[in-house]
Image: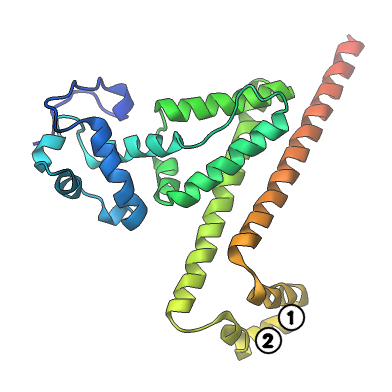
Amino acid sequence: MPVSDSSDGSVWLRHERPPRDRQLSRDQIVGAAVPVLDAEGHRGLSMRRIATDLGVTAGSLYWYVRTKDDVLELALDRVLGEVRADPDEPDWRHGLAGLARDTRTMLLRHRWALRELTVRPNLGPNAFTLAETGLRLLSRAGFADADLDAAMAAVNDQVVGAVIAEVAWRDTLTRMRESGVEWSEHATTAYLRDVAGRHPLLARRMAAGRKIDVERDSERRFEFALTCLLEGLAVTRHAVAVAGDGAAAAL
C-alpha cells in the first residue's frame, strides 16, 4: 500500500524517510527509473518494473515514494543535475551559452524529461541550482527584477522549443524510413508539386531538406538561434540602460 501522508504536492515538500533497510534507498529507486525512462519512455516505467529491476517487492518502494509521480519528479531533478555551467563565469554570454548547450544535450539524452518540465513544479535542488546559475549570469549582464525573469524565460523557452522541434523532426524522419518511403518520394507527388508552384521559397527549402544531415543541421540551427538570442539580450539590456540614464538625467 502507498505511504499515508497528509501533505500534498511536490515530493520535495515532504520529509524524506530514513532508509528502512540496506537493500533499498530513494537514490537506488531513481537510479533504476532513469534508464527505463531513457530506453522506453513513460510507458515503460512502473513501480513493479522498478521493483523487479532492483530485486525487491513493489510494496517496499512505498516507504520511500508515494507514487510514480514522485519517482518522475525525482528522476527529472536527477538528470537536471547533469547540466554543467559556471555561475561565476565573468563573460555572461559565454556562461549562458554553455548553460543552454549543456541543457540541450541533456534533454536530447533524456527525451522523456521534456514532458516532465511542463508538468512538474521543478522544486528540486538541481533545478534550483540551474535557475540560480542562469539568474546570476543574467544579473551580471545587467538585468534585474521582472526583466531578469523575462530574460531567463527567453533562454529556457529557446532551449526547450529547439529540442522539441529537433526531436519531432528526427522522429518524423525515423517513421518515414521505417515505412520504407523516402522524402524524395513524397516530394514527387502531385500535391507537393502544386504546393511548390504556389510557394517557391518553401519549395526550395523543402528540396534542400532532402540532403540535410539532421544532427549537423540541428546543431547549426540551435547555434544560430542562440547567437541571435544572446545578441538580442545584449542590445535589449543596453537600450534599457540608456533609457534609464536618460530618465535619471531628466530628474
Q: Quadrant of the N terminus?
A: top left
Residue at 68% across / 86% down in the picture? 194
What x and y, as percent, mark residue 172? Answer: 50, 69
* Residue 51 higher or lower than 13, as above or below: below
Residue at 48% across / 47% down in the picture? 107
What x and y, as percent, mark residue 59? Answer: 9, 38
How far is mark 1 from mark 2, CA to CA? Answer: 7 Å
Which residue in the protein does label 1 denote?
198
Which residue in the protein does label 2 denote?
194
> Decide: marks 1, 2 in contact (CB < 8 A)?
yes
* Residue 118 higher or lower than 13, as above or below: below
Which kind of residue does numbered mark 1 sit on? Arg
In the displayed orientation, state which residue is furthest to the front.
22
Crowd band around label 2 with a 10 angstrom C-alpha radius: few (<14), some (14–19), many (20+): few
In the drawing, does residue 43 fall left or right of residue 111?
left
In the drawing, does residue 88 fall left or right of residue 234?
left
